[in-house]
């Protein structure tokens, strides 16, 4: 069942992207790969991003169609179930190449939800722009 609070799920994704950016700031790929704590923290944030994407359901694709939502949801399964086959370089490439555009797409989705262009959850939960009318 999709989240009844999609704005919160998009914010969860942004929060975790920002955490990864803090953890990896000024690191090179070699430093990242050699730093087990940072690598593990990054994986944990990616798991939370994946879970938030799952909770968005089809709304993620609806509000941010340019993002690979299937891959975003799928990385969580790979990290949980195929952890021994994870390409550490792929995780670094995800951090460097994919998180910036995902963050921007989530900010835009939140803006659309707040403007009332798209629904903000289930039936009846749409925010009214002006209740005086």
Image (cartoon, rainbow, N blue to C red):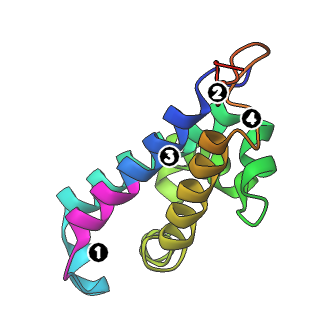
State the image coordinates of residue 86 (x, y, percent, origin top left): 50, 61
State the image coordinates of residue 123 (x, y, percent, origin top left): 80, 15
Label located before the other in sequence (3 or 2): 3
Q: Single out the mark in the foreground, 3 or 2.
A: 2
Rendered residue at 65%/46% (across/down): 73
Label located before the other in sequence (1 or 2): 1
Label 1 sits on residue: 33
Report how far apart the C-alphas of labels 4 and 3 lie in the structure.
13 Å
Which numbered circle lies on residue 49? 3
Q: Single out the mark in the foreground, 1 or 3.
A: 3
* Direction from residue 98 to residue 63 in the image, left or right: right
Which numbered circle lies on residue 57? 4
Label 1: how many residues lie within 10 Å, few (<14), some (14-19) or many (20+)? some
Rendered residue at 59%/41% (across/down): 114
Q: Is residue 109 above or below residue 131?
A: below
Q: Is residue 5 above or below residue 51?
A: above
Q: Disc 4 vs disc 2: Cβ atoms closer than 8 Å?
A: no
Q: Is residue 42 above or below residue 116?
A: below
Which numbered circle lies on residue 130? 2
Report how far apart the C-alphas of labels 4 and 1 lie in the structure.
32 Å
Rendered residue at 64%/19% (across/down): 132
| Label 2 element class | loop
Label 4: how many residues lie within 10 Å, few (<14), some (14-19) or many (20+)? some
Which numbered circle lies on residue 59? none
Image quadrant where one finds the N terminus: top right
Label located before the other in sequence (4 or 1): 1
Q: Is residue 121 above or below residue 117?
A: above
Q: Single out the mark in the foreground, 1 or 2.
A: 2
Is 5 one of the magenta-colored residues?
Answer: no
Label 3: how many residues lie within 10 Å, few (<14), some (14-19) or many (20+)? many
Magenta stretch, residue numbers = 17-26
Q: Single out the mark in the foreground, 4 or 2.
A: 2
């Amino acid at each position: 069942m999709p989240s009844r609070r999609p704005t919160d799920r998009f914010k969860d994704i942004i929060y975790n992207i920002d955490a990864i950016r803090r953890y990896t700031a000024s690191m090179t790929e070699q430093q990242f790969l050699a730093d087990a704590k940072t690598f593990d923290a990054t994986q944990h944030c990616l798991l939370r991003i994946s879970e938030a994407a799952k909770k968005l359901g089809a709304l993620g694709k609806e509000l941010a169609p340019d993002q690979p939502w299937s891959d975003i949801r799928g990385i969580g399964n790979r990290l949980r179930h195929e952890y021994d086959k994870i390409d550490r370089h792929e995780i670094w490439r995800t951090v460097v190449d994919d998180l910036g555009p995902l963050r921007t797409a989530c900010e835009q989705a939140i803006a659309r939800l707040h403007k009332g262009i798209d629904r903000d959850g289930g039936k009846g939960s749409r925010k009214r722009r002006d209740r005086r009318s």
